[in-house]
Image (spheres, rainbow, N blue to C red):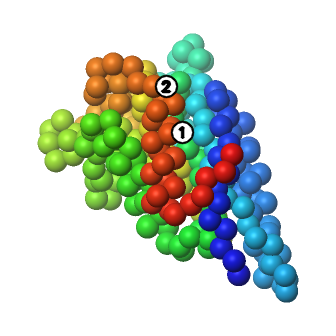
Amino acid sequence: MNKNKKVKITELGLLPYSQAWELQEEYFSNTIAIKKQNRNSHVPIITQNHMLIVEHPPVFTLGKSGKMEHLLINEEILKAKGIDFIKTNRGGDITFHGPGQLVGYPILDLDNFFTDIHKYLRCLEEMIIKTLSDFGLNGARSDGETGVWLDLDTSFARKICAMGVRASRWVTMHGFALNINTDLSYFDYIIPCGIKGKAVTSIAKELKHEVDTTEVKAAILKHFSEIFGVEIVN
């Protein structure tokens, strides 16, 4: 069967988490339905690949393996501060999404690329590491902790990009959240990713000036295209 290396990029702007999740589920379910249908078809339908690019209003999301005690404020304070809280079906623990953070949700049929979730996550990390390098920052991986960090092997280790995915029948959803101009004070209300004793940072904080999100987005898509060998379509 032909492999489709094209990925359609959809920019959603500022959109509530629940609406973006609903759109992800729609693409995800449609792709899985096609794959099930193809098992009994002599003329298989080629599956499509997508990536949603979005920013969210302030929201804490808890992954399947997350613990409620990693949320450090109660429902009343959440409401007072205008922060949503949503339990999701992605991997990982608790994280924050908000304005100034670039969130990417690849909904890929990995049968079009490679059927290896570990490799998929490492490729996403490599995409972020190369993007950070374009801005003069040295990102790194931490063994057993998905995502990208700065100054990893020091007492000043800090996370700059969180990741959490879901996959079924080699179709992916959820993805990565890179802090660009994010208000980092929101992370004080959680134990980010359930990891105590490590700080969170942003590109703007590291460079000591606001960063053009459009430039970061262009760098991410460039490295995504190179690392996954995809053709980006709009």
Residue 47 versus residue 195 in the image, above or below: below
From the top left corner, tell me how far across and down residue 219 is, in percent: 45, 42
Q: Quadrant of residue 36?
A: bottom right
From the top left corner, tell me how far across and down residue 162 is, in percent: 43, 43
78, 45: nearer the viewer: 45
In the rendered structure, the answer to whether residue 217 lies left or right of residue 84 reads left
From the top left corner, tell me how far across and down residue 32 is, in percent: 74, 66
The answer to whether residue 158 is seen in the rendering is: no
Q: Mark 1: which secondary structure?
A: strand
161, 214: nearer the viewer: 214
**Which numbered dot is residue 103?**
1
Amino acid of disc 1: Val
**Other residues around mark 2 within 10 Å, as few (<14) / some (14–19) / many (≥20):** many
Q: Residue at x 59, y 68 (%)?
A: 110
Q: Quadrant of the N terminus?
A: bottom right
Q: Mark 2: which secondary structure?
A: loop
**Other residues around mark 1 within 10 Å, as few (<14) / some (14–19) / many (≥20):** many
Q: Residue at x 15, y 38 (%)?
A: 155
From the top left corner, tell me how far across and down residue 221 is, in percent: 51, 47
Q: How many marks on residues?
A: 2
In the rendered structure, the answer to whether residue 18 lies left or right of residue 118 reads right
> What's the CA distance linking mark 1 and mark 2?
10 Å
Residue 234 versus residue 168 in the image, above or below: above
**Which numbered dot is residue 216?**
none
Q: Quadrant of residue 39?
A: bottom right
In the current view of this chain or complex, which residue is farthest to the left? Answer: 154
The answer to whether residue 77 is seen in the rendering is: yes
Q: Residue at x 76, y 59 (%)?
A: 29
Residue 51 versus residue 99 in the image, above or below: below
Q: Residue at x 62, y 73 (%)?
A: 111
* Residue labelled with disc 2: 100
Amino acid of disc 2: Gly
